[in-house]
Image: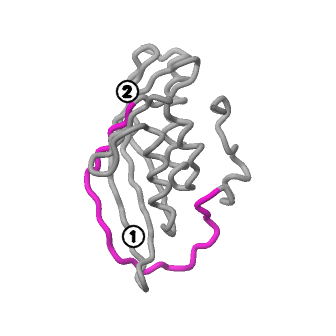
Amino acid sequence: MTDTLQDLAARQAITDHIHRYCRSVDRLDIPLGHSIWHDDGIAEYPGYYQGPGKGVIDLICQNHQGLLHHTHQVTNILIQLQGRSAGSETYCIATLRMQKGDKTLQMMVWSRYVDHWSCRDGHWGLDKRIAIREFDEIREVTPMMQHDLARRDRSDPSYGVLPVQPEGNEK
């Protein structure tokens, strides 16, 4: 069975939102993070947050402001379309660096995002996310060099080539 162009466009829109989520928390870009959620979206991050979807973006960005570096990589994105609704499962590895006194610590978190999506008024958005943390670790590391080009805000070089707000999401 072949996907229709509409199905392929829906899959791409959902995948783009998953990637935008990662960029939003890595760059502390709250408006970008809010843009992936429908206004009534719900987030469940057991042991961390449960409530409005946009609220988890606010909390993550607030709690992670003091971190030195922050990256999310997503893999194994599975999407099941059902008309104007969809479900997805995304594997995610987040790596976070922080300074505690004279120690550089690195935290790694392996998670899955189990998401419910819908298309409303031509816009795909997140209705519900359950973030399942599989395992994590924190350890002291020795940086190989000083990393000073990446920024955790809109002064990051990526904003010179990518739009601040995704087209069609100027809510």
Asked if the residue at tag 2 contacts the one at tag 1, i.e. Cβ–Cβ closer than 8 Å, the answer is no
Q: Position of residue 94 (x, y in %)?
A: 41, 56
Query: Of the numbered discs in the image, which one, if any, rests on residue 87?
Result: 2
Element under label 1?
Answer: strand
- 162 left or right of 71? right
Kindly indicate the quadrant of the structure image that contains residue 102.
bottom left
**Label 2 CA crowd tier, 10 Å (few <14, some 14–19, many 20+):** some
Q: Residue at x 33, y 42 (%)?
A: 50
Q: Residue at x 56, y 47 (%)?
A: 30
The residue closer to the viewer here, 22 or 51, is 51
Question: What is the magenta range?
Answer: 128-153
Element under label 2?
Answer: strand
Q: Position of residue 170 (x, y in %)?
A: 66, 33
Q: Position of residue 72 (x, y in %)?
A: 46, 53
Q: Amino acid at mark 2?
A: Gly
The residue closer to the viewer here, 140 or 118, is 118
Q: Quadrant of the N terminus?
A: top left
- 158 left or right of 68? right
Q: Quadrant of the C terminus?
A: top right
Q: Is residue 16 magenta?
A: no
Above/below status of 136 relative to 6: below
Query: Of the numbered discs in the image, which one, if any, rests on residue 35?
Result: none
Q: Is residue 133 magenta?
A: yes
Q: Earlier in the sequence, mark 1 or mark 2?
A: 2
Q: Residue at x 54, y 40 (%)?
A: 34
- Residue furthest bottom as drawn: 102
Residue, disc 1: 106
From mark 1 to mark 2, how far is it between C-alphas? 32 Å
Above/below status of 145 relative to 128: below
Q: Residue at x 39, y 53 (%)?
A: 93
Q: Amino acid at mark 1?
A: Gln
Scheme of colours in the image: one colour
